Image: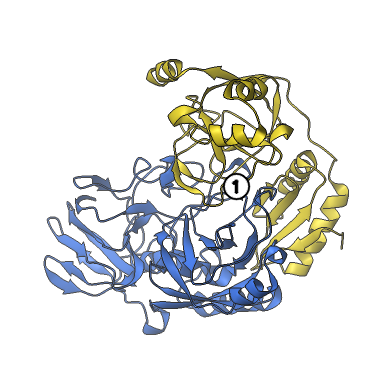
Amino acid sequence: MRFTVLKPGLQTTVQAGPRTGLRHLGVPAAGAADPLSLALANRLVGNPLLAPGLETTLNGVALRFQGGGLVAITGARAKARLNGERVKLHRTLAVAAGDELEIGPARLGARNYLAVAGGIDVEEVLGSASTYLPAGFGGLQGRALRGGDVVATGPAVGTPEMLKTPKEFRPLASNSWALRACYGAEVDLLSKESRFDLFDTNFSVGFRADRMGLQLEGARFEVTSGGRLASAPVFPGTIQCPEDGTPFLLSIDAQTIGGYPRVAQVARADRHLIGQLRPGNHVRLLWRDAESARDELLAKHNYWGEWLPGIRAVI
Amino acid sequence: MSPGVRLCGDDIVSAECEDTGTAQALADHLRESGDWLECVAGIASCVAQFDLATTGAEEAMQRMSTALRAAPAAREVEAAVVEVPVCYGGDHGPDLDDVCERLGLSREAFIELHTGREYGVDMLGFTPGFAFIGGFSEAQDVPRRSQPRVRLAAGSIGIAGGRTGIYTLPSPGGWQIVGRTPMQLFDTGAAQPFRLRAGMRVRFVAIGPDEFDAWCAE
């Protein structure tokens, strides 16, 4: 099956699972910024959980199908229309040749995911089909979708089923988020007061917010590195604090090495939430030690595993 | 537990290393074990990410401590020298004058100093193929910019903390930009996608803006 892009939206890309094991060569993860939502969409169309799908940014996408098949939409709270008629998120939708599907602007959260039975048919680059925009590789020619693009999907496998995500497995988007986090490697470079502020500030997400990272505004942090810190490895979820005092939360496209103090690390259990943060959202960091962060991850795996077997590879 | 081994997140362990060579050797050793998701060498540390679903933090720290004792002290240096053409100053190097002022050098003297020796590639990182190149000790006290730039052109050559860095791709960045190379350092279509590798030796060669344009046109 194929579809044509009618309206590409602000930044719609093909995303699947992350690139792994290549950070020492400077190759970032990429992949769905909210992998849980991608997995939920794929579940509804019978795909492997991290099969390549579309990730929209803030204002949706519109497509016209050239053949029939099953699709599903998850992620941010948004209105979707099939040939002008409202359709629900978190449901398997059957589309036919000529049908037009539109995902509207995200009202809560930042990104929607569209899965198509069979997955988006793109070649893997460095082990993943995911688009890494800064280097222009992966996905559809390494770039965001444009109006007029024709995108092919792979052969659907398994028996088609019309499903809906059970209510208890639909993540809630919000304007206000809590992210569990552990201390980072250089938390000691923060002044005593700033260390306290880190877990006591109602941050708001700044306008510099993309797949690489997001600025967290709300308090001015005092760091004492003098700009001469030895560059050190960073990961999605790392919170760095440059000398200008505004912490920066790294997301899924994060660079592999950073030169600013790493003051905190968002726990693995909550990293998938970073993909739904948008400018103006409020963020609180909740301190955890490594042991309780692990218990919470295992609890999350246990919970979601009931609907998404294989969740351990997703979040 | 070895001193210098510590957690820097729920699923990330860091080991302090004497120098970049030791960090590289430890990262290679960890990668060969297959026990880790990512093994990345920094300038003076080696940081590894483990699968928190199967491994607890204590166990990971123990593994890192054991590896620290078992890993070789350094990695071998390669013999080939790669010449990297650089157009210094002007639009290609907006921070050149600031850096010169900080070092008390004229532009000409800076370029002579920067091109007058061989360097070693300490590591690749930041973005695909970004090369951290050590051995510019005169610029030890040149800091990063306090506010990183939002977008740097591909090929930008930056200076910070006694090192030279090459931004392979357009990206945000905080190093002081002194010039730009027209050389393509990362190509997913190539058999070897990364032109530079850790352990390689590099020499910078000054070119003018016309040569830069000619190179790009090729």
Tell me which corner region of the image, top left, top right, bottom left or bottom right, holds residue A169.
Answer: bottom left
Q: Which chain is blue?
A: A
Amino acid at the residue labelled 1: Arg
Seen in the picture, residue B73 relative to B208 is either above or below; the reply is: below
Which residue is more in the foreground, A227 or A267?
A: A227
Q: Is residue A196 visible?
A: yes
Q: Which chain is yellow?
A: B
Which residue is more in the foreground, A96 or A64?
A: A64
Where's residue A239, x and y in %? 58, 63
- Colour setup of the view: by chain
Q: For numbered disc 1, what is the local secondary structure? A: helix
Q: Is residue B132 visible?
A: no
Which residue is more in the foreground, B15 or B107?
A: B107
Q: Quadrant of the C terminus of chain B?
A: top left
Residue visible at 61% across and 34% down in the picture: B101
Where's residue A307, x and y in %? 45, 76
Residue visible at 87% across and 63% down in the picture: B1
Q: Which residue is mark 1?
A: A23
Tell which residue pokes out farthest to the bottom in this image: A168
Where's residue B70, x and y in %? 87, 48
